Amino acid sequence: GAEGEGNWLRKLGAEDAEGLSLGVFKRKFERPREPCLLKNVISCAFQGESGERSPSVFQLQNLMKAYPSRLFGVVVPGASDPPYQVRMTLANYVHYMTRCLEDPEMLNDEEYDPLYFFEYQLPDELFEALNPPTPFFDDDLLAELAASSSRPIGAQTPNPDKELVSLLDERRWLVIGPAGSGTRWHTDPHATSAWNLLLKGKKLWVLWDSPDGRPPVGVKVIAGEPGVRGEVHEPPSAVRWFEQNLLPSLQGLSASSAEGSNPDKRRRISAVSPGSNQNPLLWGIQRAGEVVFVPYGIWHCVLNLESSVAFTQNFITQVNVREASEELREHEPELAAELVRLVAQLRS
């Protein structure tokens, strides 16, 4: 094929965390908003290999044994009407996951988009079992505010009457899902960045830095309601997006290569390609023990290739504190003011 023809798709950069310094991580990835895959992070996410500091805390059998009757939040993907979330025991959810994998009718259903375990209201001992992978995410301003706050963090029981949950509570998540589940295209809230540690399974990630704020191809845009700022995005399920948008582009690319350098064919392919030479789609496969770093404002879509267990955390550092504070002024002004005060204190 013609040179540069496939430049709209590029592999996600990978680094060995054990040989990577904080300064290089900041310079190469965080400041330029460049997503990356960090390998060999288990040792810096868990201090010690026994008791509470062991990754075995997050094995499904151990979680079910530790919390037999506790109800957890499970997302109903793509729900346009309530319920957007249901609550169930982990044992019931694991039973549901098994059924997803064994029931051919479910797997062949065009609308297949399984319920997704996505919970931030976790027992304290689970939060304490895991560190943000050191040293890359040690300077999280949200974690510092949460540690110094006198208010209770991560309420143990959901409050249905409370419409707004503070970002201080809703920033750390345990995420579990069967093969074929995943998260649709989105950017993380309030200009936060995120790290995602995979504890079990395998995930396919696609990320995109939109040059002008528009969402990725295949994501439907609906104008916001009168008086409400911004647009509403309706992305298809992760598996459907890969089938309908990425696979045809890849097939077109391989057909284009087979046909030689036909310029008309190349123009047609570039018109449907989800990325561009200047703003390529990044893709990567994440395996257990690896972290994906997602900088603020980066669109991403994730598909579980196997049943997976992951822990993810949204964070703010001095790199994105200006953007995050601006976003939070509208949604959570008290927290925005606390962030500004904390940064002034750190810089003085």
Image (spheres, rainbow, N blue to C red):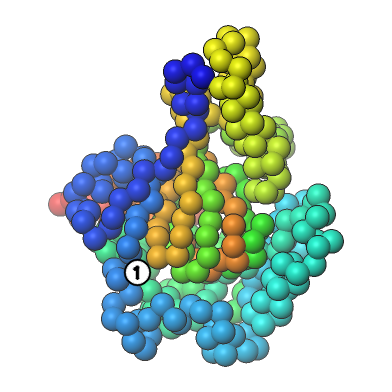
Element marked by disc 1: helix
Give the residue drawn at x 51%, y 19%.
1
**Seen from this angle, which residue lies furthest left?**
348
Q: How many marks?
A: 1
Asked whether 101 or 73 is in front, the reply is 101
Decide if residue 187 is on the left or right side of residue 336.
Answer: right
Give the residue drawn at x 31%, y 45%.
30
Asked whether 119 or 340 is in front, the reply is 119
Q: Position of residue 347 (x, y in %)?
A: 18, 50
- Residue 50 falls in which quadrant of the image? bottom left
Q: Position of residue 171 (x, y in %)?
A: 47, 62
Decide if residue 306 is on the left or right side of residue 209.
Answer: right
- Residue 222 falls in which quadrant of the image? top right
Asked whether 19 or 171 is in front, the reply is 19
Decide if residue 114 is on the left or right side of residue 146.
Answer: right
Q: Position of residue 278 (x, y in %)?
A: 44, 23
**Quick check: can you spot residue 231?**
no
Q: Is residue 98 above or below residue 179?
A: below
Q: Is residue 70 above or below residue 13?
A: below
What amino acid is found at the position of numbered circle 1 in the picture? Ile
Mark 1 nearby-residue class (10 Å; few <14, some 14–19, many ≥20): many
Give the residue drawn at x 84%, y 61%.
105
Q: Position of residue 302 (x, y in %)?
A: 56, 51
**Seen from this angle, which residue lies furthest top?**
263
Q: Is residue 40 above or below residue 208?
A: below
Decide if residue 165 is on the left or right side of residue 146.
Answer: right
Q: Is residue 117 above or below residue 137?
A: below
Residue underneath mark 1: 42
Give the residue drawn at x 45%, y 82%.
57
**Quick check: can you spot residue 62?**
yes
